[in-house]
Image (cartoon, grey):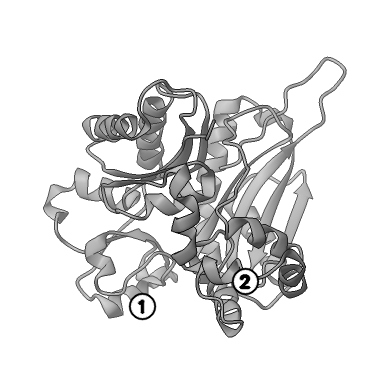
Amino acid sequence: MPRKIVHFDMDCFYAAIEVRDHPELAGKPIAVGGARDRRGVLTTCNYEAREFGVRSAMPTFQALQKCPHLIVMPTRFDVYRRESAKIRDILIKFSTLIEPLSLDEAFLDLSDHPGETSATVTVIRQLIWQNTRLTASAGIAPNKMLAKIASDWKKPNGQFEIRPEDVSEFMLELPVRRLWGIGPKSAERLAELGVNTCGDLQRYSRVELIEQFGKFGLELFSLCRGIDDRAVEPDRIRKSLSSERTFPRDLTSLAQCEAKIPELFEDVMGDLKKSGATDQVKSAFIKIRFSDFTRTTVERAGLPLTVENFQALLRQGLSRKSLNVRLLGLGVRFHEPDSEGATQLELQV
């Protein structure tokens, strides 16, 4: 039986909370992030700001050049975490198979839910609105990749379903840029090969894709056909706890990368506190995926868990390659269990 996977994505989450809590900001271009005089970088912005070319990960001074009347609000992670917890409490009423990706998005596996999926998702989105006065977009599909793609289809405050019988046709005209792991440089490289859509990419064999992209070629062979076998992984006992984010546009400077660390740090520290495993932390690490899809990890044992220390690990990792950054992650690893069965935890978000 086909799986029923849903990707929920809160619309401009941080900015929407600021507008909700400050009604006088409604209809105005709003961003959340660092101040101009501190080499600040935006965490997010609302749709009104995007009309001026403002986007997340943009330096604040540059955003203000594009939109001089942009209102930049400071981050309030305690509030964002509180609202995120409310949303997660709603999702868990429908399925315990929840995989949080960040404070503002998560996968939900409704395969075992008895209701009609589209109607159930509509109810969930209505409950989110009733409890938070925030809107969510959702994508429904047989797998995680397609569900995430579908959630962007009718943003903001909409939902879209890709049915199993429609996957083959849907993939033919889908731009390869929409596939997981494809950034501007790889899309340009594919365009040089005459590949702009997944239908174009399907003409290449596994061997040809491996020759062009190495191991990632194997993933591309499946992804361009809408195949993604990864399960929705709820919070469960593992060996580490981490948070990571893939960016819609590559980060191009140290300042942009450093500005992402506080949000990831808040995610990890909040979940670490809830896990009750703070005293089991063995080491801290930073993970970086560069624009050429290579990865590097910097890990240190016994490191105090502070934003500054994670930023120091980040700088060390970035020194290994002079490339833009597609993904950043940070986390902690736990000591191995002793003979009495000490608990280990990992949360991938």
Q: Identify which amino acid the numbered label 1 is placed on.
A: Gln
- If the image is split into quadrants, where does the C terminus sit? top right
**Residue drawn where x is 24% and y is 70% of the image:** 51
Image location (x, y in percent) of residue 147: 46, 46
Extreme residue in the top direction: 340
Tell me if residue 200 comes above or below residue 215 in the rendering: below
Task: Work out how far the residue at label 2 is from the one at label 1, CA to CA, in angstroms.
Answer: 23 Å
- If the image is split into quadrants, where does the N terminus sit? top right
For the residue carrying disc 1, how many other residues have a C-alpha within 10 Å: few (<14), some (14-19), or many (20+)? some
Q: Nearer the viewer, residue 22 or 164?
A: 164
Do residues under tags 2 and 1 come within 8 Å of each other at their CB atoms? no
335 on left or right of 256? right
Answer whether residue 249 is visible to the viewer in this image: no
Foreground tag (2 vs 1) = 2
Q: Name the N-terminal-most of marks 2 and 1.
A: 1
Q: Mark 1 points at which residue?
A: 62
Q: Is mark 1 on a helix, strand or loop?
A: helix
Image location (x, y in percent) of residue 280: 73, 30
